[in-house]
Image (cartoon, rainbow, N blue to C red):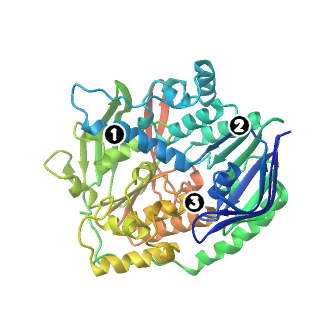
Amino acid sequence: MSSLHISQGSFRLNDSHRLNIDQLELHAGESWAFVGANGSGKSALARALTDDLVLLDGQRKSDFQRVARLSFEQLQKLVADEWQHNNTDLLSESETDTGRTAGQIIQQDQQDPALCLRLAQQFGIQHLLERRFKYLSTGETRKTLLCQALMGQPDLLILDEPFDGLDVASRTQLADMLHGLANHTMALVLVLNRFDDIPSFIDKVGILVDCMLTRTGDRTTLLAEALVAQLARAEILDQGIGLPDTEIPGQKDRLPADTPLITLRQGEVSYQDRPILHRLDWQVLPGEHWQIVGPNGAGKSTLLNLVTGDHPQGYSNDLTLFGRRRGSGETIWDIKRHIGYVSSSLHLDYRVSASPRSVILSGFFDSIGIYQAVSERQQFLTRQWLQLLGLLTVADTPFHSLSWGQQRLTLIARALVKHPALLILDEPLQGLDPLNRQLVRRWIDVLIGQGDTQLLFVSHHAEDAPACITHRLTFIPQDDIYRYQTDRLSPLSH
């Protein structure tokens, strides 16, 4: 029976930090979940298990032969590589998009069309096999890479945040599939931020704190201890939260009170003759805060990209933003100056060399990177945001050296820094631990409570929706398209 043993292990993270694992034993047939706060070392532990970190002290022994690991960082790199390989913005009319399809990504390391089709059918993505990978939604890319990881029939499978980015049905389906995969020949390891994401079939749990594996044991005992610790830490949120001020003290971005922020009439978006949005009528009136819900691939992010001005088909639609018809002579900056934005695609696209400080500062300019002079006031406010995030000591380190959750917190601060008239949050809480998810929801409610910002919020986790939500737009599958349902919510309905 295959196994992995670590004893008194100390693994190098960088010049000043180590991951410490006193004792850990994994055996074929076991199912583990490792949980911890953002920056606690969860992803580093996953790398240590795959022998991808330098062992400075102690022992690591493993006789697993086929190890597969899937992480946010791998997804980020793959998406970046696909866009860099064939930048469609630079193609001439005679050139075609040669980006790889989902089927090619799945079979990247092993050619087996029959197994590829079988795995795709299990995940419900067989219809995506011929579609370009870089055009898939976050959830669709996650399922594609899961299929890729399973192609090698691993005996140790390590999944870093496998449930983030998946809708409710897909999370349930994945948990059931993982339960079916667990057998006496394979060890399964899940690395998670959410304690409530731990599937019921998991046998053992490990908890990380400050880059140290502090506790391992049976699931029931450790989750009871962790819940008590979470509740104790969450008490700090009851002390009240204040957000840093606006760039001009007391002056916020205000739009006319009698003008809808967004009006879309019979909205249509298609890709290769496949409808993404189909005759959507939608209006966001002053004072409304919308939650947008629907399955992976329904077109939620496409709708938001129309609003932000990042989708080219915005010009071919009857779309009015902030009182101006799209294509009436406005620039992209006329749109973006009113908007704060966070999404998984923005996170994946943030490939420039940057520090957490420069990422937050870029929110004042609606840019990726800093290309103009920064005022003392902007620097002062950025320091306040970094202190609020607990990132002041790493403010000038590389952005990508932060944990994924810390990166996401930094991008959220970037979106909030100018107190925008419209705040667009597309799966903003991906990769955040329970305390930071609660913290960000409180930030949103504080910002909304000040009365000048309106919210568009997308999340597959119903419990993530802030208390301020007033309306819901639901994408409902109907044959090969989606129909749309709008509802006004009572204060307790979400």
Q: Identify whether 84 is placed above or below 213.
A: above
Q: Is residue 157 left or right of residue 164?
A: right
Identify the residue at image location x=42%, y=48%: 345
Q: Earlier in the sequence, mark 1 or mark 2?
A: 2
Badge 2: residue crowd in 10 Å (few <14, some 14–19, many ≥20): few
Q: Identify whether 487 is placed above or below 43.
A: above
| Quadrant of residue 404 within the rendered picture | bottom right
Identify the residue at image location x=18%, y=52%: 331
Q: Of the residues tagged 3 and 1, which is closer to the observer?
A: 3
Identify the residue at image location x=53%, y=74%: 390
Q: Position of residue 256 (x, y in %)?
A: 23, 63
Tag 2's secondary structure? loop
Q: Tell me the residue that label 3 is attached to.
A: 432
Identify the residue at image location x=61%, y=46%: 163
Residue type, label 1: Asp
Q: Position of residue 71 (x, y in %)?
A: 58, 48
Asked whether residue 62 appears in the rendered view, the answer is yes
Q: Of the residues tagged 1 and 2, which is closer to the observer?
A: 2
Residue type, label 2: Arg
Q: Which mark is residue 66?
A: 2
Q: Nearer the viewer, residue 145 or 420?
A: 145
Question: What whole-number distance in Å separates the C-alpha atoms at marks 2 and 3?
Answer: 30 Å
Q: Which mark is residue 281?
A: 1
Q: Earlier in the sequence, mark 3 or mark 1?
A: 1
Quarter holding the C terminus is bottom right
Number of marks in picture: 3
Asked whether residue 250 appears in the rendered view, the answer is no
Residue with the most extreme left position: 329
Question: What whole-number distance in Å separates the C-alpha atoms at marks 3 and 1?
Answer: 33 Å
Q: Which mark is residue 422?
A: none
